[in-house]
Image (cartoon, rainbow, N blue to C red):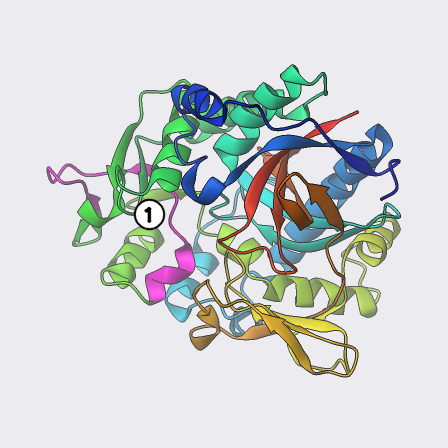
Amino acid sequence: MDKKVYQVVGSPHSNRQERINQLQELGFTWGDLDHYWIDQAVAMDHDIWDEIKLASENLWTVFDKAARFTIGRRDLYALMSIPEILWDGLDSLLPNEAGKMSRYARFDYSITEQGEIKLFELNADTPTGYVESSVVTPWVCDQIDLNSPNVKMKDHVRLSWEKEKPEYATCVTYGEHLEDSGTIEMLVKHSGLDVQCIDTLDLSVDEGIVKDKKLRPIDRMFALYPKEWMAVDDGGEALAYAIESKNIELFNPLHAVILQSKGLQAVIWGLHELDSDIFTKEEHDSIEKYMLPTYNKPIFDGNYVSKSMFGREGGSVKIYDHQGTLETQDEEGYDTSVLFDRVYQKRIDLPKIELHNGTFHLLTGVFMINGEPCGLLGRAGGLITGNSSHFIAMGVK
């Protein structure tokens, strides 16, 4: 692999359990589940980090503009597979100011061996990997003399939550699901606010008012809960009505679901092909350079990927070869394409890296917190980055 792009550094410590114990004390309690954490690091070239940071800044503006373009256009809501129960809220509620439609998001990229950067998708609603990036990555990088841009992540969270001021933070099965529980607990810790963590399943909605387990009304809440599931879950319609009625404000806000839909990438690519004037020339150049052609119909003859507009953790992903034959698909994650439409995207494979426990494909995540690119997340897995992939720290040379 071209060392100008990145290289694997470090060797696993001889006493893994000792390091696992240290990380548990820091709040990373799921690192040893299926050996999820790999005790090495990826060193990225400084120029590549500068470019991916600039690309993320430009694409963030592109996604923001495109999302605002769709507001009120229900034909585009349908094209992006946004559940109909959310449409009234999207049309009646005011989105956040420019660049802040979502305050907590993550871009996922492929960076080829030649340094070509291509965006796979944006998780603008409920990205995980926060503890791995904000706590573990700086801890690892400090030990092997790598710079970590991630040290500023908690500062951006604090600024974001100072603005939002949630009273509660919630995830499903809080206290039992280690990763989701640990994620909201760390976000609360880094916010510096007095925020109570609760289980989403303990919430109730009474005449448009969301209440906690003790039936206390909730006005403002950070929810690590995918908004599209309001169309499926019991009580989802009632929660959507509570949001629409302004009885509760969720963070990320409701409009983050537009950014979350992979159908927005098809909208962006369509506007780009039409040379739309909603984007500047620089933004069109960024779309052409960093995004992949994406459509809501299977127009490719071969070398493409299809995935659900609201798929997560690799679920629903299918990869097709140059002849248009299915090459591989995710077998572990839940296939959400039974609920939401698919998008079709030009194929580009993740680069390979050699780690102490084998050969993996590397996915590079860049967190966008309060509108700023401020954190790297490395995921090592197969051609499809799914639930069985591993976390590896990424730093900058």
Task: Give the camera-side residue of 197 and 25.
Answer: 25
Q: Which residue is under mark 1?
A: 246
In percent of width and height, residue 216 lies at 15, 36
Left or right for 71, reference 62:
left
Part of the protein shown in magenta: 210-231
Q: Position of residue 325 (x, y in %)?
A: 69, 83
**What's the amino acid at mark 1?**
Lys
In the image, taking residue 67 as reference, residue 166 lies left or right, namely left
Question: In this view of the protein, can residue 285 be seen by the observer?
Answer: yes
Q: Is residue 20 above or below residue 357?
A: above
Tell me residue 308's x, y (percent): 54, 69
Q: Tell me where residue 45 sits by quadrant.
A: top right
State the quadrant of the N terminus.
top right
Residue at image point 32% right, 67% down: 232
Q: Residue at x 75, y 27 (%)?
A: 396
Which quarter of the rendering shows the C terminus?
top right
Was residue 13 drawn as part of the magenta stretch in this picture?
no
